[in-house]
Amino acid sequence: MHSPIPPHDYALTNRQRRNLSTAVEFLRRGQPVLVHSAEASATILACETIRHDMLARLQSHAPEDTVLAISGHRGAAVGLPRSGRDIIRIAYPEGLNAQIITSLIDPSADASPGLVLPKLRVLPSHPLDQACIALTKQAGLLPAIILTPASPPLPEPIPAIAASDVFPDHDCAPLIKRKNVPVTIPGVGPARTIVFRAFGGGEEHLAIVIGRIDTGQSILTRMHSECFTGDLLGSLRCDCGEQLRGAVAEIARHGQGVLLYLAQEGRGIGLTNKLRAYRLQDRGFDTIDANLQLGYEEDERSYIPAAQILGLMGVTSIRLMTNNPKKVDAVRRFGIDVTERVPHIFPSNRHNGAYLQTKASRSGHLF
């Protein structure tokens, strides 16, 4: 078994998390952010929230150095040669406007009739590009930016963030603090909800503890990524709602266990982008290709928070309710002993049959 995640040594500091939070908020508002490393720096704008006054200022200051950068998946979707690259830089197209940007980065948008994308010229990418694209993902935005290596004169200061603070080493974990809230679940009985939040801010994850767990045993556990449409609205196009309710019922029947409700909507791409993916699925793409068309990986989730939450609760051994062997491998990597994979299967319906088949044939789920 791998060693548990060090709880403090590799976490971002409060200052680093404040910088990250500020940078994310600026990008969401269509404002520029400076990303820097020891070797280079770049001023970036998120394409999805572009403010054209700011774009004009950026581009007029250094027109020959201004470029677009999109993920390799999105580049491949619009016919650009990927050659194994994670990020593709594109020479700034002549006549770039909002319609062209939208058509280039968002396949779920309705393109204007007769709109033709300009000829795109691929440029060599730069190591800094990965941090810049990762920052847009952390902001819940499509992975596409306009970038200039220059620092243009702007009317007010802009936030600066180190590239290493955007996506730290994948084996690191945020610090977590928690609040313990007793609740009663109708049909289940007394339970505890423990709220976990990354130190310095970030999404909240929940641990719902049913019964009095004995950490000396292997605990029945479900790691459930939130799904607004399935969990709350009862959508039939996935099996998430059934899996959530089924997990609570099975843990209650068993008498003790933990449900981790993880803030990782849409396999980590966020609710807005999941709804974009739904539009693409309605046009014939499967659940994986829809994510790739948007420029994301097929699964953007991290199970580091889940592993650390279990560790902070004193749970080191679990029986994991899942059909996804990758979840088993992921939490084992981070120090949790999975003694058994407990199948968690529910009947398909006419709306989610193809979705479940894709999960089986392309993502390795076991049904």
Image (cartoon, rainbow, N blue to C red):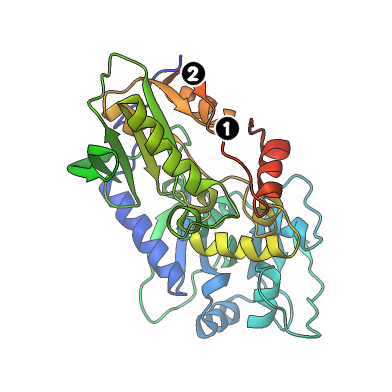
Per the image, the residue denoted by label 1 is: 324
Instruction: Give the total number of marks visible in the rendering.
Output: 2
Q: Percent x, y for residue 11? A: 34, 38
Q: Is residue 347 above or below residue 135?
A: above
Residue at x 46% of width, y 14% of height: 1
Q: Is residue 201 above or below residue 196?
A: below
Q: Callout 2: 10 Å neighbours few (<14), some, many (20+)?
A: some
Q: Residue 125: tell me if it is visible.
A: no
| Secondary structure of the residue carrying numbered label 1 | loop
Q: Is residue 62 above or below residue 320?
A: below
Q: What is the distance, in whole Å, between disc 2 and disc 1 at their CAs?
A: 12 Å
Residue type at mark 1: give it. Answer: Asn
Return the residue nearer the eye: 207 or 7.
207
Return the residue nearer the eye: 129 or 247.
247
Return the residue nearer the eye: 74 or 93.
74
Q: Is residue 344 above or below residue 282?
A: above
Q: Percent x, y for residue 180? A: 18, 40
Return the residue nearer the eye: 60 or 185.
185
Per the image, the residue denoted by label 2 is: 340
Would residue 18 be found to the left or right of residue 249 on screen? left
Q: Residue 146: tell me if it is visible.
A: yes
Residue type at mark 2: give it. Answer: Glu
Residue at x 69% of width, y 68% of height: 107
Residue at x 77% of width, y 51% of height: 82
